Structures are given as C-alpha cells and as structure tokens.
Image (spheres, rainbow, N blue to C red):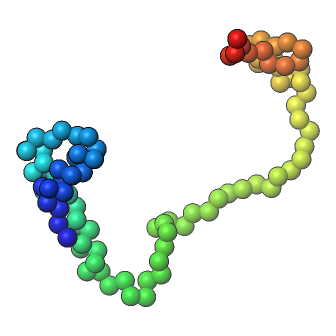
C-alpha cells in the first residue's frame, strides 16, 4: 500500500489545510516512508507469540478502603482563605 499525492490532497481538504505542492510532495514521501517501515513488521515471525496489549506488565496499585475518623472542622478550616458558619466561603458564581 502506498500513499499518493491525491490521498494527501484529500486528507488536507478534510482537515481544511491549504498545502503547497512542495508540502504535498513532502507529506506523500514521509507517509510512504512510515508505511514502508511499518510493513517491515510483516516480515517478523510471530508464530507462537502471545498477543499483548502493552509491552510492559502494568497493574494498578490499590489500597483497601478503610473507614477512619475525618479531621475536625476547625483543623480543616485553618488553611481556608475565608470561612463562614463552618464552611468554606467562596466568591459567588451566579448572580
């Protein structure tokens, strides 16, 4: 499979890009080089290789949910720039 200048023009039109002829030619060459490189992967023998979703083993590190006492309201409001009636006071966003 190869990319033609017509393909590049079509994608540029969809993306609403105005490309010069030099840019069209450059992108055509670059995209074809990418496809040729990706085509090299078809030459690899992958028989017996298990499919993977990621090359590294990843796992989420989760801690158990434990119920515990919350901070006292006085300590929580110590860093509040402004408070009123034991609540954070923030600027109004609605009139």
- The front one of 75 and 89 is 89
Q: Could you say where residue 29 lies in the image, as x and y percent from the top left?
A: 13, 56
**Residue at the spot 43% in from the left edge and 88% down from the top edge:** 48
Q: Could you say where residue 53 lies in the image, as x and y percent from the top left?
A: 49, 69
Q: Is residue 10 above or below residue 69?
A: below
- Could one spot residue 33 in this view of the protein? no
Q: Is residue 60 above or below residue 57?
A: above
Q: Residue furthest left?
A: 22
Q: Could you say where residue 8 lies in the image, as x and y percent from the top left?
A: 18, 53
| Residue 76 in the figure: left or right of residue 33 | right
Q: Is residue 33 above or below residue 75?
A: below
- The front one of 10 and 52 is 10
**Image-quadrant location for residue 23:** top left
**Image-quadrant location for residue 81:** top right
Q: Could you say where residue 28 lies in the image, as x and y percent from the top left?
A: 14, 55
Q: Is residue 44 above or below residue 73?
A: below
**Residue at the spot 90% in from the left edge and 43% down from the top edge:** 68
- The front one of 87 and 75 is 87
Q: Quadrant of the C terminus?
A: top right
| Residue 54 in the figure: left or right of residue 6 | right
């Amino acid at each position: 499979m190869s990319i033609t200048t017509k393909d590049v023009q079509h994608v540029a039109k969809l993306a609403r890009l105005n490309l010069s002829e030099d840019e069209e030619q450059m992108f055509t060459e670059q995209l074809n080089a990418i496809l040729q490189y990706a085509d090299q992967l078809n030459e690899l023998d992958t028989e017996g290789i298990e499919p993977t979703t990621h090359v590294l083993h990843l796992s989420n590190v989760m801690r158990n949910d434990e119920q515990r006492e919350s901070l006292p309201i006085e300590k929580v409001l110590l860093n509040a720039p402004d408070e009123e009636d034991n609540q954070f006071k923030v600027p109004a966003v609605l009139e």
